[in-house]
Image: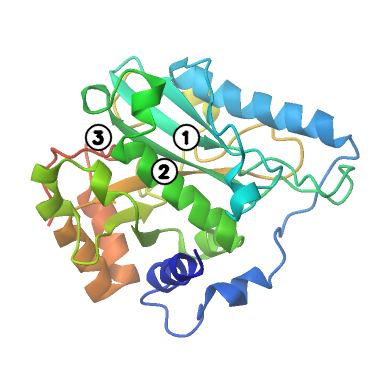
Amino acid sequence: MGRLLSNFADCICCGRGNRYQSADTWMNQPLNIFQPRSTATLEDLLEKSSRAREAVWQQLGSLEPLVLSHLVSPTLSGGPKWPALRQAFRLVRRPNGNVILASDGLSDPFDDITLGDGNVNGFGLEFYIETPGDEIAETIHEVKKSWQFQLLYTVSQLAAGHGGIRAIMDDMKLLSTEAEGVNEAIPEEHRKALVNAAGRVGALLGLQSTPEEPGMPQETVDTDDAGTGVPERIPDMPLTEVKLVNIKLLTLAELKLITDRGAEGRRRLSELFSGPDKLASSLHRASAV
């Protein structure tokens, strides 16, 4: 896992000189730069955080009642610790036919601070991936085997292990990574265009609906247009601000633009991705470069 985290830190920081040299540098930074605003009990804060996340997803479509989770938390077997130990994911079926998979717990308050005074909403973000409904299985059991879920899961675990991704995102706006453990879930006929020689797939993190409008207010969410309408932040979180971060699957040609040009390449891709499916990830879309 340490090798993965180092790769993640190196990849997302390409094009920024020596400012972000390693995951350890950021692991030593405060987990939160915002002022907490509650003295409620941990149980109350967890419930309020969960309700706030659910409210966002319910406005975007039909939220599956079943939560994608583990019988035993991966943390107990040596995996990264999420703020309240619980690691879960939600599935939303949108009216346009798209499906959203989202992490559910990276923004939980930390369970080692029993009172809200001094606590924060976890790592300050949740990740999501949006995909055409006909490219993902119907049953929860099969969804967990999909490349969409595997990519979401890998990025979420990397962020939890790193601990300071939110601060980097606030500064850089767009990040990128090469995710391991996803290639086997991608159909063989698509691997040539998506999987590199190291067996990794590229992803752009933080893409927004339009470059001029970095996020949309909750009240303007449009559930009829594919790939749009997800707000930039989750309203009504009990402690601190929480961002919703899009994960966009990249082709190898798009990933090369980033490895060659760093932050400039990420910005260029954000301009090239357009149309109603700008935020959606699909195996069948044409490469933007």
Q: Amino acid at mark 1?
A: Ala
Residue 176: % across, % down: 36, 61
Q: Amino acid at mark 3?
A: Asp
Which residue does the numbered mark 3 point to in the structure image?
A: 277
Disc marking residue 102? 1
Q: Residues within 10 Å of mark 1 (few under 14, many from 20)?
A: many
Say which element carries label 1.
strand
Q: Residue at x 50, y 48 (%)?
A: 156
Question: Above or below — where is 232 with respect to 59?
Answer: below
Which residue does the numbered mark 2 point to in the structure image?
A: 152
Residue 115: % across, % down: 90, 42
Kindly indicate the quadrant of the structure image that contains residue 130: top left
Residue 252: % across, % down: 17, 59
Nearer to us in this view, 190 or 100: 190
Q: Is residue 152 left or right of residue 250?
A: right
Which of the marked residues, 2 or 1, is nearer the chain's N terminus?
A: 1
**Separation of marks 2 and 3 at Cα, in angstroms:** 18 Å
Pointer 2 and pointer 1: residues touching (CB < 8 Å)? yes
